[in-house]
Image (cartoon, rainbow, N blue to C red):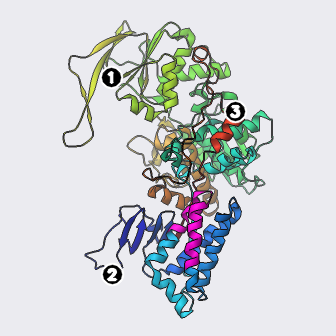
């Protein structure tokens, strides 16, 4: 709930101008009443309306500055005349009124230009900028006409009583944990300017090959194209620029020119060379800051390297992302270096800041009767995937097929790890592969992706839903079978969440050779000195405020699995990018702070940029989503060749042309 003087947002009108305290209404939207840490917001203007929190706000000045912020953007864009020149005219007219030189005909002209922009601009930013401006004139008309009739400047014209902070977003970028500029990299593909595409991605996402292949693409859930026909294939378009760079042996396309090494004695330690650690190192190195990564494994990449199968994430492609970081002149990586609690204390003393980026590599138990990790046939998902991937990617160890060929494998879980387990088991020659899951098909698709689930079914994985293991049965310590309980989803008569209820008398037995729990993972917390008494979450992870990623110990940061628990690559990257930004300032001034852009990102995320109820007009529907070629099912079941071949150039261009370029601009007055 927000305290409002006046607001109009997504057709919700709150007008408290003449209301008594008892009659004041509240808005249901999470509008940015407070900008940051006690700093009040005077007003907010965005794509769907505006809100005023301080009645002393000069509405003419507010409108003029919003138009000015857009003019700066449109000058840099220049994609269409209505957006570029229309924005300039709207700003000039508002500025003219604001300085006391306007005419009543200017209001009519402004409305005419705004109408043209909303109908003919190529992208949404040009279509939506006039919306709040026209509503300001409609609901605060007297403020504008007073400037015209009295030929006097608006009271605050030319003064600096308010700061105006703006940022550009898009529904897809907002829902992306790394806030990748998605329309920009799609536009690069559309224009066949792959360098521009990749640079746009690497502004906030250095692992382009990786997240172009194994990202769960939450951005596609916020694609406005879905309100018309189908969402853009955002994830697959991301890999186009990255593959172009490496397939043509080009030099690295950095988003900005890396700064020269500072050589000022400041240095940052990072524990773990997974997605979080690599990301933080990269963005710190772009600033010329010395970074040392300590990695326990003999290989780099963390769980993506040793956990995500080759057929989904070819190691040669992931290594290109890793090499991007390795080649930064201020980055040092030390492998085979296990950091204990004592070693972490030493590192803490030697470095100006430390970021913990270690993963969750302990498989959690099934919690069933007779569960014994030493039982022959009981194999934790992380250990199983380690063996599979260390062999296929690095020729370390021995083939898992020696254990699994001709066997019956049962996996318990419903996420990406369990999908990797069952699909790897197929490839290792298992005779029968079953996944047991307590919930339904829709939930497992939501936990992973439709593509992942569909491909697993095609390869022969048997999914058994509404089921859970009750007991493991063994003979002399060797697993023989499982007792499985059946459940049903029973609606709550009071309208609450439906409950899973065990079906009495419906339990049954499954004979198997291996049971592989993939229900979740936990972190190895031995690394944390007990005397530091770090604040932990109820999930056994390091607690931060979720914004700057500083732990309860000054100078100790955490991002990725160790901060939140098992998470997707894009989440880990997003956290680490933010943490690196905070660290880059902290090591010099000792303060934890966010940039204005980062604060605005958080406000947009709370407000929710995407409106799934929006009706899309003005576009020709019926443009089908492109689908890249997949490796034939019978062929891929017997090897680890990459399943998804990616788009051809023609397919990529056609898919990129479906993007509606849904940029929006939001601004606060503080």
Q: Is residue 121 magenta?
A: yes
For numbered disc 3, what is the local secondary structure?
loop
Please identify the dominant SS of the magenta region. Answer: helix
For numbered disc 1, what is the local secondary structure?
strand
Q: Earlier in the sequence, mark 2 or mark 3?
A: 2
Q: Quadrant of residue 86?
A: bottom right
- Residue designated by label 1: 467
Q: Residue at x 70, y 66 (%)?
A: 75
For numbered disc 2, what is the local secondary structure?
loop
The region drawn magenta spans 108-131
Q: Is residue 112 magenta?
A: yes
Q: Earlier in the sequence, mark 1 or mark 3?
A: 1
312 is higher (above) or lower (below) than 56: above
In space, the residues marked 2 and 3 are separated at their CA atoms by: 61 Å
- Residue designated by label 3: 648
User: Tag on residue 18?
Assistant: 2
299 is higher (above) or lower (below) than 590: above
- On screen, residue 7 versus residue 75, left or right, reads left
């Amino acid at each position: 709930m927000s305290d409002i003087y006046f607001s109009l947002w997504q057709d919700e009108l709150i007008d408290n101008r003449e209301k008594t305290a008892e009659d004041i209404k509240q808005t249901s939207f999470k509008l940015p009443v407070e900008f940051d840490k006690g700093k009040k917001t005077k007003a907010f203007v965005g794509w769907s309306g505006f809100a005023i929190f301080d009645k002393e706000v000069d509405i003419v000045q507010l409108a003029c500055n919003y138009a000015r912020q857009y003019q700066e953007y449109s000058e840099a864009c220049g994609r269409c005349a209505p957006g570029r020149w229309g924005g300039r005219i709207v700003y000039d007219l508002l500025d003219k009124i604001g300085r006391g030189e306007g005419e009543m005909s200017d209001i009519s002209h402004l409305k005419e230009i705004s109408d043209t922009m909303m109908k003919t601009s190529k992208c949404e930013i040009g279509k939506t900028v006039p919306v709040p401006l026209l509503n300001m004139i409609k609901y605060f008309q007297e403020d504008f006409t007073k400037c015209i009739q009295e030929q006097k400047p608006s009271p605050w014209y030319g003064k600096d009583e308010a700061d105006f902070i703006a940022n550009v977003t898009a529904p897809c970028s907002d829902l992306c944990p790394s806030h990748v500029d998605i329309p920009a990299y799609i536009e690069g593909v559309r224009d066949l300017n792959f360098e521009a595409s990749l640079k746009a991605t690497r502004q906030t996402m250095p692992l382009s090959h990786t997240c172009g292949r194994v990202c769960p693409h939450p951005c596609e859930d916020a694609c406005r194209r879905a309100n018309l026909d189908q969402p853009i294939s955002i994830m697959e378009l991301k890999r186009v620029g990255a593959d172009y760079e490496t397939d043509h042996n080009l030099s690295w396309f950095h988003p900005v020119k890396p700064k020269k090494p500072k050589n000022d004695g400041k240095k940052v330690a990072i524990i773990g060379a997974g997605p979080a650690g690599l990301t933080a190192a990269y963005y710190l190195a772009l600033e010329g800051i010395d970074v040392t990564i300590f990695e326990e494994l003999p290989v780099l990449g963390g769980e993506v390297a040793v956990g995500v199968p080759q057929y989904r994430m070819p190691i040669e492609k992931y290594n290109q992302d890793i090499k991007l970081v390795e080649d930064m002149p201020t980055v040092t990586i030390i492998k085979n270096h296990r950091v204990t609690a004592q070693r972490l204390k030493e590192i803490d003393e030697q470095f100006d800041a430390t970021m913990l980026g270690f993963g969750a590599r302990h498989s959690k138990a099934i919690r069933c009767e007779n569960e014994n990790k030493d039982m022959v046939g009981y194999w934790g998902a992380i250990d199983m995937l380690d063996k599979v991937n260390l062999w296929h990617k690095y020729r370390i160890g021995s083939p898992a097929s020696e254990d699994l060929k001709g066997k019956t494998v049962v996996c318990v879980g419903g996420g990406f790890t369990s999908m990797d387990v069952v699909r790897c088991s197929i490839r290792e020659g298992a005779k029968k592969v079953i996944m047991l899951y307590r919930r339904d098909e829709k939930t497992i698709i939501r936990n992973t992706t439709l593509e992942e689930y569909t491909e697993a079914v095609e390869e022969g994985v048997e999914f058994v839903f509404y089921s859970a293991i009750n007991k493991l049965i063994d003979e002399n310590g060797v697993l023989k079978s499982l007792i499985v309980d059946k459940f049903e989803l029973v609606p709550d008569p009071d309208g609450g969440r439906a409950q899973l209820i065990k079906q009495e008398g419906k339990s049954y037995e499954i004979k198997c050779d291996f049971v592989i729990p993939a229900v979740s993972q936990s972190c190895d917390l031995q690394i944390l000195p007990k005397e530091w008494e770090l604040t932990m979450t109820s999930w056994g992870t390091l607690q931060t405020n979720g914004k700057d990623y500083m732990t309860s110990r000054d100078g100790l940061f955490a991002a990725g699995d160790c901060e939140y628990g098992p998470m997707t690559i894009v989440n880990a990257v997003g956290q680490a990018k933010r943490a690196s930004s905070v660290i880059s300032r902290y090591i010099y001034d000792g303060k934890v702070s966010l940039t204005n852009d980062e604060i605005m990102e958080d406000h947009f995320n709370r407000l929710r940029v995407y409106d799934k109820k929006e009706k899309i007009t003005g576009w020709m529907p019926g443009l089908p989503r492109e689908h890249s070629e997949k490796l034939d099912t019978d062929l891929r079941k017997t090897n680890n060749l990459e399943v998804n071949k990616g788009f051809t150039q023609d397919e990529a261009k056609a898919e990129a042309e479906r993007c509606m370029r849904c940029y929006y601009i939001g601004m606060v007055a503080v």
